[in-house]
Image (cartoon, rainbow, N blue to C red):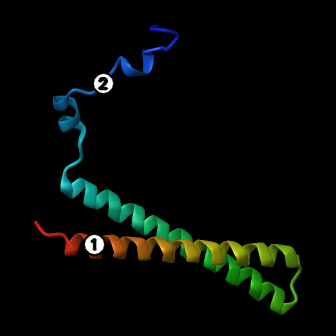
Amino acid sequence: MINGISLAPLQHTARPDETAATAPTPYEAQKNFASVLKESIEKVNETQSISDEYTSKLVRGENVDLHQVMIASQKASITLQTAMEIRNKVIETYQEMMRMQV
């Protein structure tokens, strides 16, 4: 402890040889990105399906609370909007990278 500041979090710093051994290869990074993207799209699809199911039950007159239908609809809307914004940012970043001069 120096002047009341603890150095405990700083005691273990990665050496360059340690980070190189744990860094994923480009192929692994691509697989990880692809799996995260696929899972995210599946979750968006799942929320849309749940919303459609609740709406269909409401239209058929089945026993479903209106607030459940509205909550499911808002969740589906928000997840879709979020996915679209992320897509837009990824495309924007890609376009910016393509404009860079090497």
Q: Is residue 3 above or below residue 16?
A: above
**Residue 64 showing in the rendered view:** no
Say which label, 2 or 1, has the lower sequence index.
2
Q: Mark 2, residues whose alpha carbon is within 10 Å: few (<14), some, or many (≥20)?
A: few
Give me the disc on residue 96.
Answer: 1
**Relative to the observer, which residue lies in front, 81 or 92?**
92
Q: Is residue 95 above or below residue 23?
A: below
Q: Identify residue type, mark 2.
A: Thr
Q: Quadrant of residue 62?
A: bottom right
The quarter of the displayed image where residue 50 is located: bottom right
Task: Give the labeled residue for mark 2.
Answer: 13
Residue shown at the point (69%, 79%) measured from the top left: 51
Camera-side residue: 63 or 73? Answer: 73
Residue 48 on image: x %, y %: 62, 79
Q: Secondary structure at mark 2?
A: loop
In the image, taking residue 62 as reference, residue 79 lies left or right, namely left
Give the image location of residue 35, x and y in percent. 37, 62
What residue sits 24% from the left and 47% below the top?
A: 24
Q: Amino acid at mark 1?
A: Glu
Position of 38 with respect to 15 (left or right) is right
The residue at the far bottom in this view is 59
Q: Is residue 54 left or right of residue 1?
A: right
Q: Which mark is residue 37?
A: none
